[in-house]
Amino acid sequence: MARRKIVVAMMMHETNTFSPVPTAIESFGRMGAMSGPAAIAELIGTNTQVGGFIGVAQAAGAEFTLPMAASAHPSGPVQKAAYEEMCDAIVGEIRKGCDAAFLALHGAMVAEHVDDGEGELLRRVRAIAPDLPIAVGLDFHAQMTAAMIDNATVVTGYRTYPHIDMGHTAERAGRTLIRALDGEVAPRMVWGFRPMLTSTLSHTPSRQPMKDIMDRANAAEDSGQVLNASVFGGFPQADIPHLSCSAVIVCDQRTAEGEILLNRLLDMAWERREAFLYTGEALSAQVARAKTLDGGPIILADHGDNTASGGTQDVMSVVEEAMRQGLEDVAAGPIWDPGCVAQMIASGIGATVTLELGGKVDMPQLNLKGRPLRVTGTVKCITDGEFVVTGPMATGTRVRMGRTAVLDTGKMLIVVSEKRSEPFDLGVFTHCGIDPRRKKYVLIKSRQHFRAGFEPIAKHIVMCDGDGVTSSDLKLFDYKNRRQPLYPFEPDLQLGRNEA
């Protein structure tokens, strides 16, 4: 009997439609856009969706190909040419013939010409392979659409945020599909949504109000009540018609029990809709509170400008406030500023330099102008910006920050990099000789992913409402294409009969 052939592919991007950062095909160079043996070598055995899918294919004794492995940091809409190049590679490989497809997607990709990037890819695949079994893994921040469900066989989503179960999510989807290929199960999916936004600072499944919603979904899947159950918090920094909180249940033939579970999960979320919103305070008050805390490290999380939600990573408001209030023994960064990196490298280690740091990018969607911060210090270290992740998120992958330099101002060590990189692993500091465990303050640009690597070492965590296109203040964003009505924009929204 011939071995099964499985096409494994990754096309991942979380699109912040308010971000000024362009998303060309070159943006997908962090782990791709790669293909073939190079992509397999990079991702096999890693805690990523592709790593998980490869493991399932190998365990099933299947042959597999990897025609596209593309993942980019969140940023603005994907350029049309980039989207078409990635789709063509995946669809082209499937057109050659295969027994199944394992697709590592995100669920929140918006291209210049398509507002449902994943649904359109799946539609194209289904058009050339009407009966092909397709397993899809999605991010917890997916914006679910009918096109995704109608054109896939199995869909699963991350159960965690920070996303420490990327590999496991792919394994859940892949194993269900293998069971279907073996005739053990007949997957049928039901899905739904509630017209509500949830803040990324308030919807992590490790804490309420999301915790017991996700726990109930997990228990249903782990007990075998359903084949798979996934809840999606959505991604609010996207001006698209399918913004919502949603869920997907994969049932074995009969869907009645899955539909009951689906509505219980979504009703729980709707009843708690107010608790899913974030309420902030003045940045000056947050930094002042950090100064009163004992011990360390004290994590200052600048969630208004984080790369993993589409931030420019060069807004200096939190760094400036920390300096203004006289914080000492601080490790900060990474700050994205290729020009300042070049200036420090040209000056050399030990040189004293004055930099116009950060603030190079305007954010017209929020009417924010880039504003550099003048800083003077000594060039402490210069590196290639590469390290292997040892923490629980994306374990085993290689981070490439580009050339990186450290500026020592006396009170603050500032890591500056050529490329944007979310600080979810201690390696952003340790690879350039800084031990964040020994610092009083660690100032990083992150919303929740920092918790994977930094929460275990933190004595205290202070969320900082810095400026930027990943702000949690929804009033700053001008939504023109959103679903209407949508909570909290229509605060008195009542569900219709079908939704309730």
Image: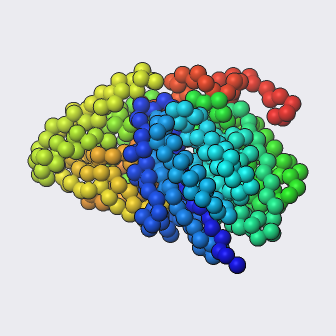
Q: Nearer the viewer, residue 65 or 44?
A: 65
Where's residue 315, x and y in %?
A: 35, 34
Q: Nearer the viewer, residue 343 or 267?
A: 343
Q: Residue at x 86, y 58 (%)?
A: 253
Q: Quadrant of the C terminus?
A: top right
Q: Is residue 447 above or below residue 216?
A: above
Q: Is residue 268 left or right of residue 115?
A: right
Q: Is residue 438 visible?
A: no
Where's residue 29, x and y in %?
A: 40, 51
Q: Residue at x 11, y 46 (%)?
A: 347
Q: Is residue 4 above or below residue 112?
A: below
Q: Is residue 190 left or right of residue 484?
A: right
Where's residue 451, x and y in %?
A: 49, 53
Q: What kind of colouring is applied to the model shown?
A: rainbow
Q: Residue at x 26, y 56 (%)?
A: 384
Q: Is residue 497 above or below residue 28?
A: above
In which image quadrant can residue 131 be found? bottom right
Q: Is residue 333 left or right of residue 449?
A: left
Q: Is residue 190 visible?
A: yes
Q: Residue at x 79, y 58 (%)?
A: 187
Where's residue 388, x and y in %?
A: 38, 63
Q: Nearer the viewer, residue 460 or 164?
A: 164
Exactly how many numbered labels are in the figure? Answer: 0
